[in-house]
Amino acid sequence: MNEEKFLAIHNRILPFIHETPVMTSRLLNEISGGDLHFKCENFQRMGAFKMRGAANAILSLSIDEKSRGVVTHSSGNFAQATAFSGQLMGVTTYIVMPNNAPLVKKDAVKAYGGIITECGPSIAQREAAVEDVIMQTGAISLHPSNQDEVILGNSTIGVEFFNQVSDLQRIIVPVGGGGMIAGIALAAEAFSETCEVIGAEPAAAADAQRSLREGKIQKNDTANTIADGLRTHLGDRNFPIIQRLVKDIITVEEDEIIIAMKLIWERLKIIIEPSAAVAVAVALKEKKAVRKGKTGIVLSGGNVDLGNLPF
């Protein structure tokens, strides 16, 4: 795809999203030894980048498909993004949520008009519940990360970033399901000849790093990380893009994630969630890598359980 096609996608979803700002910090530059630029998707509508992919996926449907509604399974940000996008566009949204999802997230989905179906916590139980909803309603299924329209919606983070900061040498992106880093990598290919895309992942859930190095999708037996948004695995639509365009995926430990999260709260005076802090932690850990040129860091979201902070 060329620049014009990515710009067209951005223009299409722009009425439904925020064009998020980029922030810098002299102190964090001193700590890292780099020139860091933070893309604040924590300021996105509903508090996370997921709004971009959900909006583009629903806008890509035909009139008939929209009339049938959409269904997805999510315990958090994509659930809220789908419900909110549907509310803005007049499309019915069915949201399958595990019964152990936080009440605050269920309440947010309901506030956006989402019709919740609760199920067991496993992926198999979620997928079975989605199939039940499709059988009952005829709704169109949306995937939080492994769907072309969602990936292309996420690419608009890169479209904005390259417009806001000239000569980015690298962008560090948190990796969970892989939809965001795949989209940004596609935008980087179109808008820059030199910008590298680097993934950031918790060491406790390092399936994407293993996948990239072993050449096939890996899954975690356990994913005991504070970065709850990054516990999912890659899919067959985004993994080939990641294989082709992502330079590396770097892991960080839990204490490094917490330190990075606290630094952003203290120094930038903004709220980010642990999953976003993983990208910051990589920049602080890989000081040699960020010393050359400008480094973009995607702060993917700011939806935090304030009653359960790690500091």
Image (cartoon, rainbow, N blue to C red):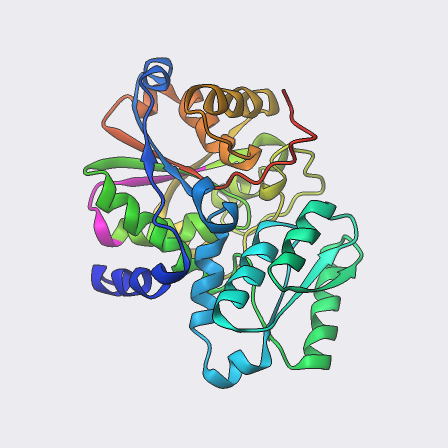
Q: Is residue 196 left or right of residue 148?
A: left
The quadrant holding residue 140 is bottom right
If the image is split into quadrants, where does the N terminus sit?
Answer: bottom left
Which residues lie in the magenta part? 190-199
Number of on-image labels: 0
In the rendered image of this protein, does residue 35 appear above or below residue 168? above
What residue is drawn where x is 64% and y is 82%? 138
What is the x, y in percent for residue 231? 62, 43
What residue is drawn where x is 74% and y is 47%? 103
Q: Is residue 188 left or right of residue 150?
A: left
Q: Is residue 79 magenta?
A: no
If the image is split into quadrants, where does the C terminus sit?
Answer: top right
The quadrant holding residue 202 is top right
Task: Tell which residue pokes out farthest to the bottom in this image.
Answer: 64
Q: Is residue 217 left or right of residue 61?
A: right
What is the x, y in percent for residue 130? 69, 69
What residue is drawn where x is 54% and y is 21%? 256
The quadrant holding residue 40 is top left
What residue is drawn where x is 53% and y is 67%? 86
What is the x, y in percent for residue 223? 68, 38
What is the x, y in percent for residue 200? 47, 35
In the rendered image of this protein, does residue 161 appear above or below residue 85? above
